[in-house]
Amino acid sequence: PISQLNPYQNKWTIKGRITNKGDMRTWNNAKGEGCLFSIDILDASGMDIRGTFFKEDAQKWINVVEVDRVYTFSGGRLKVANPQWNKCKCQHEITFDRSTDIVLCEEDASIQQNIFEFRQIGELESMEPDTIMDLIGVVTAISPVSTITAKKSGQELAKCELTVMDDSESQINVTLWGDKARSAENDYAGCPVTAFKGLKLSDYGGRSCGSIMSTAILKSPRIPETERIRAWFDARGSNATVKNLSTGGGGAGRVETFEGRKTVSAIKDEQLGYNEKPDWLSFKATVSFIKKDKEGGPWYPACPNKEEPCRNMCKVISTSDDKWMCEKCNQQYDKCTRRYIFSLTLSDNTSTCWASVFNDQAEVLLQGHKADEVEEWLTNGDYNKFEELFDDALWGDFIVKAKVKSEQVADEQRVKTTAY
């Protein structure tokens, strides 16, 4: 069993179910570059352990091992786990290597799908922020996928919010990131009962939950709570009046009700953007000006690699031989993918503000025309078509979800607004 593993063993074999599998992550620094992903393994005794694959071993196993399948695992190095990042019960963790052997087994009912300690959503309002806890409920709504830009890496991250309800007749928003966000629309269609292990509670936008690297998600788990919540939802939950814990503020994926909207002047009048965390608001506004005439066009050249770590988002640089170099994936390409980035002004009857717009929102504004297509117009000298596209985007009314945050520019504090 997992509980008997220790770093002094040379040969060992464990049997367990994979309860969580993280996304492939990459790094590139002065010491080198590489990739990794981790899995959590649960055995029949209820003990779980974290295992991590690096570089070639990560590439070898990433598409082999699957969540909720049972395997035997042997070979690898054992070390003391860091409890700051590893929430598994075992005090050790595994680094899988070239000696690792993983064999798929038949289904074993003696090994649970996962070990949960559920809290009801109605309890979360009185719990401390940053608490790590487990939830189970019905996914009743899925927000559109949006992107945010990470401050440290500058990389755009996919983000999606689920609305989750349980039989405490309360609901809360759960934020997913990366691949889990991109696949959410398909994964959670049809209001499935879904269990979340290891969500982080936040006081952002009232109360909300966020997935972290170790969060495990299981649809329709084979546990009694699933039957209880499904029976409640089918009988009355779908029509029940529930308490929404995720109110006020909010993230990019949600649009406020009519009553919750503000005006453009609220950004200045309410001194938004000066808190430790960004402020969010929604308002109805008219696009009154688009700053499209920057050198090179209102876009940036991005890596054409659709896979990790770039996903068409990381900036590339032009080389002397007319190629495009991506420092993120360390590859050279014949072509780049252009992504919009520009500023515009938003006006209502109270005020006007500048706002930054990124690719997804720009494509909505520009009737679905992609930046590569519009750049080709300019290359072919079709300047009138370019001007007409942006002129047609002016004076249209939009419901804007905006993030407001102050930034230090030289010696001046400036408030930056980003439209989502």
Image (cartoon, rainbow, N blue to C red):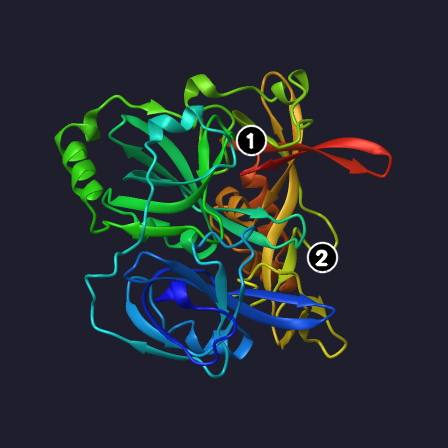
84 to the left or right of 162 = right
Q: Locate residue 47, reporting x and y percent.
A: 36, 58
Extreme-right residue of the structure: 411
x 31%, y 63%: residue: 43
Query: On the image, which quarter does residue 285 sit in?
Result: top right
Task: Specify whether residue 306 is in view.
Answer: no
Mark 1 vs mark 2: which is more N-terminal? 2
Looking at the rendered structure, the kind of residue marked 1 is Trp
Please name the amino acid that badge 2 sits on.
Gly
Q: Return the mark for residue 296.
A: 2
Pinpoint residue 300: horizontal percent, then vertical percent: 65, 57
The N terminus - image quarter: bottom left
The residue depicted at 64 percent of the width and 61 percent of the height is 301
Residue 393 position in % (x across, y down): 55, 39
Occupied quadrant, residue 33: bottom right
Mark 1 against mark 2, which lies toward the viewer?
2
* Residue beneath disc 1: 395
